[in-house]
Each structure stands twice: as structure tokens, then as C-alpha cells.
Amino acid sequence: MRDGWAKQLRTLPFKNSSSETIPPFAAMELDYFGESGKSACELLDDTDLIFRCKKPTTAISGGRLVFNSWKPVPEGGFGEFQVDPYALALADLNPAMSPDDTCGPVSGSWYIKKTGAGLFFRSYDTGRAHYVSSTIRTVWVSISSGGDTIMATTTIFGIGPMTSTSLPFTFPSADCNRIDPETGDRYSPNQVVRIYNMVNQQIGASTLIQAKRIGSRYFVDVDNCGNNFGID
């Protein structure tokens, strides 16, 4: 039975051109064929065009990557792929992934992995749309990081002030709990991120903050700090 959340996925129809059954939420490559390999659509009944999809290859690029929807699709069968910028994807979580890690498809697999590229890991699918094991399960991914700016709360220790005044600067940091801007609550499971302070002022305890990615780190400025809410 198709669950309520699955009805909310925006999809387009496709035909399975691989020689295997495509698992739910599998990574797929649009199968370009025909003259000069310029088309990924097949003509049905002389009137309708439908996309063809296959197992990813090493040459896959963002424009050719799509994800199956909620049901398996047998060889030669028809299904629906997701078209939103955020997608539910079947992932191999060995090695594990953390929010904003790059990831993507790998050659010869229906799973995305940390060793792939072209996508960003967003969060675990707590609803477990398709749960095979603790390491093979659905996750949320996006084609952009969506993580250049994040919301978080400091712990009861806050973040110390930057005291260095000459190069090389030393930036105090602390682990903080990410906040989902859509719900105003912590992610589930909780996502902890290291945030650095670039000003000579203490960032208070249990404070709602906004942090921006600079290089590989997140930095907070006191101008982007909210109220102390007494949470840890």
C-alpha cells in the first residue's frame, strides 16, 4: 500500500531498461540511446514518449541522475522517478555519512555512497521508507548542500571568545545541536555540528545561533545570535 508520505512525492514515469529489478528509491541513470545517444525517451504506441532508466555508470552526471519512487520496478517494467531537488535515496552507509557530506552514485550499484559525488547528504529518513538494514536504508539527499547557512543551539557551555590578535588566528569552537528551520526543533536523530567563533565575544549558553560555512567550517558571528532559551 502506498503510504501518505509517498503520495506527496512529485514524479515522472519511466521504463526500466536495465536487466534487473530496480529497488525502491534506487539511484538511476537516464538511459540515453538512439542516434548519437541524444535521447533518453522511448516512443510508446507511436504517440507517447517515456524516459528510460538504468543502473548508474561511472560517467553519470547530475543532469542524468534520478531516483526511483516508492515501489520496485521489474526488468522492462514501468515506474516513477522523483523530480524534487530533495529526494529519498537508497544509501549504503558504510562508510557512514554526516549532514552536508558529499555523496553520490557509484558504478554498478543502485545505492548512493560517500565515495560518490554530485549530491549532499541531508539527514536520515526517520520514517524508514525503505529499510533493509542499519547500513542499507533510505536517506534524504539534495543536489545542493543547502548547508551554507544553518541554525543551531549552543550547549550549556556556549562558545568561548576569540582571543588571538595575530596570525595565525585560533578560533574557539564547540559542538552545537542543529535546528531544523522547517520545524523549529532538533533533527531526529540529533545532528551535532562543530561551530567556530570569529569574534572576541563569548557566545552564550543554550543560545539559538546562525552559522555560515566558510571553507570546510561553520562560523558564527554575534550579530546572528538569538535569545538564551535555557535548553542544552
Image (cartoon, grey):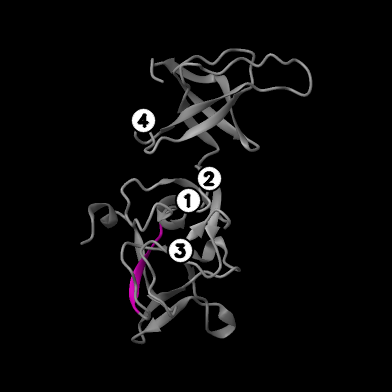
Q: CA distance from mark 1 to mark 2?
A: 7 Å
Magenta span of residues: 77-83
Q: Picture quarter containing residue 38?
A: bottom right
Q: Nearer the viewer, residue 113 or 57?
A: 113
Quadrant of the rendered structure where residue 59 is? bottom right
Residue type marked 1? Ser
Numbered label attached to residue 184: 4
Residue 104 x, y percent position in the rendering: 53, 57
Q: Is residue 101 left or right of residue 126?
A: right
How far across and down, in percent of the image, does residue 37 sit?
56, 80
The 10 Å Cα crowd at callout 1, few under 14, some 14 to 19, many 20 or more, is many
Which one is earlier in the sequence, the residue at label 4 or at label 1?
Answer: 1
Tag shown at residue 142: 1
User: Is disc 1 placed on a helix, strand or loop?
Assistant: strand
Disc 4 secondary structure class: loop
Q: Which residue: 53% across, 48% down?
A: 144
Earlier sequence position, callout 1 versus callout 3:
3
Residue located 52% across and 66% down the image: 64
Q: Are marks 1 and 2 in contact (CB under 8 Å)?
A: yes
| Residue bearing the label numbered 2 | 145
Cα gap from disc 4 to disc 2, whole angstroms = 19 Å
Amino acid carrying mark 4 in the image: Gly
Which residue position holds label 3?
66
C-beta proximity under 8 Å, tags 3 and 4? no
